[in-house]
Amino acid sequence: MTNPFRYEEAFSRNIGWVTPEEQTLLRNKRVAIAGGGGVGGVHLLTLARLGVSKFHIADFDSFDIANFNRQVGAMMSTLDQPKTDVLARMAKDINPEIDIKVFPDGIDKDNLPAFLDGVDLYVDALDFFAFDIRQRTFAMCAERNIAATTAAPLGMGAALLNFMPGRMTFEQYFRWGDLPDQDKAIRFVVGLAPAGLHRPYLVVPEAVNFGERRGPSTIMACQLCAGIVATEALKILLGRGRVLAAPYGMQFDAYRNRLSITWRPGGNRHPVQRLAIAIGKRQFARQQR
């Protein structure tokens, strides 16, 4: 090979925004990403190009044609192939030295400790409706003092929440407890994006149906999520820059050219959130008629 891989050269254009010493720090950080779909795959590849070189990735699914509109690993050449295999191959094509541990059956209560072992940051990319394992994962991150972040692709924008060690936890913010899944879904979407910047331009409202566990998506939103999450990851992993942690949240909507920083003390206990949840329940009830 005329141009053998060299880490320092491959990521030399990062220098300036990070120091050489910080690039070495990123090289030795380990990030866990659960979910290899719309946001999970682009999170992995974006962080790999940032120079992060250690990963745990998990997904039990294979690529399908319905994934083509938003998932970076979904192509004709990868149809029916396991998402973790495809994404690991793509990441290693960027950095052949990458250390990537694959969880091809996804994560569950049994392998979750191994999935989070030695991790510096957890990035949530699970399917929206994966309530039980998402709840368990964020709870274990809190127990282990692991920083955790989630960015929701909403419309043509992204909504971010960070859960930092010693700060408000996922459960304290969303207040899921043992509620039924439909209540968790409503509380999740209300809590993820209190500003609701994406709602005014939903032109086919019936495309969102919590009962049938479906909703629309765009590649723009997924890519925006990855850029935001990688930036938050840089700040968290290097310990510099302001990191907004729950009950603060951020939503940027490219379609409406708007940015909103939200603050909801008490999370979904906040009066504004409680009102939004009540409205969401009424809308869900109308869908079921």
Image (spheres, rainbow, N blue to C red):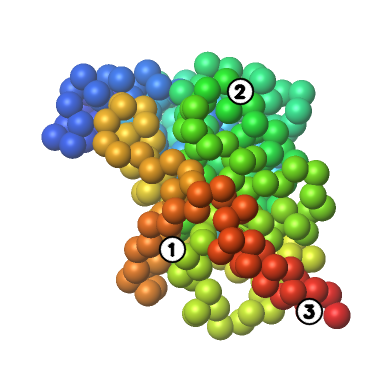
| Of residues 187 and 134, the one drawn nearer to the viewer in this rendering | 187
Q: Is residue 40 above or below residue 210?
A: above
Toward which corner of the image does residue 113 lie, by quadrant?
top right
Q: How many marks?
A: 3
The residue identified by callout 2 is 143
Q: Pointer 3: residues within 10 angstroms few (<14), some, or many (20+)?
A: few
Label 2 CA crowd tier, 10 Å (few <14, some 14–19, many 20+): few
Q: Answer with mark 3 or mark 1, whichever residue precedes in sequence.
A: 1
- Picture quarter containing residue 75? bottom right
Per the image, the residue denoted by label 3 is 286
Check disc 2 and give the amino acid type: Glu
**What distance separates the C-alpha of mark 1 from that of mark 2?**
31 Å
* Mark 3 element type: helix
**Residue at the farthest bottom position:** 203
Task: Mark 3 vs mark 1: give the one in front.
Answer: 3
**What residue is drawn where x is 51% and y is 60%?**
193
The residue under the point 31% across, 26% down is 238
Residue 79 located left or right of residue 41: right
For marks 1 and 2, the one nearer the N-term is 2
Q: Position of residue 85 (x, y in %)?
A: 60, 35
Residue 69, above or below 78: below
Label placed on residue 157: 1
Residue farthest right in this picture: 289
Can you give x and y, in whole percent of width and height, for residue 235 in the image?
Answer: 32, 34
Within 10 Å of disc 1 (Cα), the crowding (few <14, some 14-19, many 20+) is many
Say which amino acid is labelled 3.
Arg
Q: CA distance from mark 3 to mark 2?
A: 39 Å
The residue under the point 79% across, 49% down is 179
